[in-house]
Amino acid sequence: MDTVRIGIIGIGGVAAAAHIPALLQNDHVKVTAVCDVDLKRAKTARRKYFKKAAVYEDYMELLADENVDAVDILTPNFLHAEIAVEAFRAGKHVLCEKPDAISVEEAEKMYAASIEADRLLMVVRNHRFNLNAQYLKTFVEKERMGEIYVARAVWKRRRGIPGKGGWFTTKELSGGGPLIDLGVHVIDLAWWLMGCPEVEAVTGNTYSMFADNDAVDSPNAKFGDRVSDGTCDVEDLAIGTIRFRNGSVLQFETSWASNIYREERYVELYGSKAGAFWDGARDEIYYESPGAKQKTHVVNQNEIASDHARNIANFVDVLRGKADPVYTPQQGIEMIKILSAIYTSAENGGKEIHF
């Protein structure tokens, strides 16, 4: 196929902020259907962006639409696996927002359904498509880092709990707090840059210190719909360590709310030949040259398109036979195993969980 006909399921914050702009700028995409349980939001999206698209309130009706080749699933986390499996049964390809699912079993069901249907499954890992991250990936693959033996993955906010009281902060619906929301990005990025080594064991601790605090000073708190008398039974900070079978270690910290100086998002890599720091906007590479002190090389790739746009382009180009997938479902299952094991460790007082 040269043009991929896509149906969007879920017209919420991530659709408006990232997916819709990315889909609109791709010359090989035609959005032929939009769906949301709030029919008004679906109709608004059609009126503003996709004037000829069909509109649905029930995703099963969208899946029956013969003018849809693939779906873009942008719903609350607990619906990802359910909708993906039904999409594969309907013969559609699937692009899904992170996390893959809220349990290992659901992630495995998604993959099994994609194999049975012989359809593509790709879950968003937009940080892998950041140009500075891709520069660093190439640097690592050229063995210029040497052996990466330690990494750190951090994403922490001051007061940025999204949709407090709604599905974001209800564990049954989201699967957890910042670990599954933000950690799935930065832990995955660090793991990918390290070459996706096999996990030996994990330890983790989680904290919920701000469930009764309604202060907001982060734009990230605008995601999701707040519910004043809703549920907040997820962590607001997770911290821990992942040990790999090759002897390397990845430390992580993710938070929606912390008493900190500033919000930060970064990945650090400690290599035997060089070290590296990534924060989305730039790479800093630290290395030694003969007879000289350690030097710093700064790289700032010009971001013309968004990370999501390149991620979606990869999905479309794989369907067109023009590219290989940067993400594989097996990697997605492994990431959900890691996150689930960290939660298990935290529930057991930080006990080490072996794979």
Image (cartoon, grey):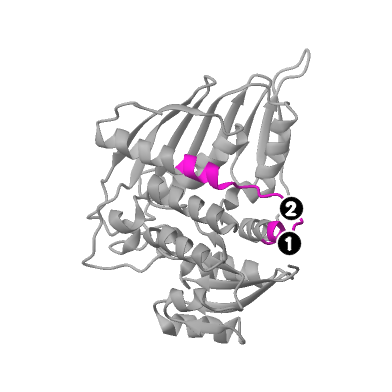
Query: Looking at the image, do the residues carrying marks 2 and 1 touch, with CB atoms under 8 Å apart?
Result: yes
Task: Specify whether residue 262 is in view.
Answer: no
| Residue 159 numbered tag | none
Magenta segment includes 235: no
Camera-side residue of 68 and 54: 68
Q: In this picture, is 148 found above or below 101?
A: above
Which residue in the protein does label 1 denote? 320
Magenta segment includes 326: yes
Q: How crowded is mark 1: few (under 14 residues within 10 Å), some or many (20 or more)?
A: some
Q: In this picture, is 330 found above or below 351?
A: below
Which residue in the protein does label 2 denote? 323
Whole-percent x and y of residue 36?
44, 76
Whole-percent x and y of residue 250?
49, 29
Could you tell whether 88 is left or right of 157 in the image?
A: right
Whole-percent x and y of residue 283?
66, 39
Q: Which amino acid does label 1 sit on?
A: Arg
Q: What element carries label 2?
A: loop
In which quadrant of the rendered image does the C terminus lie? top left
Q: What residue type is labelled 2?
A: Ala
Image: magenta residue range: 316-335
Instruction: Tell me where residue 19 sits by quadrant.
Output: bottom right
Whole-percent x and y of residue 108?
45, 48
Cα distance, mark 2 to mark 1?
Answer: 8 Å
Task: Specify whether residue 13 is in view.
Answer: yes
Camera-side residue of 162 and 142: 142
In which quadrant of the rendered image does the N terminus lie? bottom right
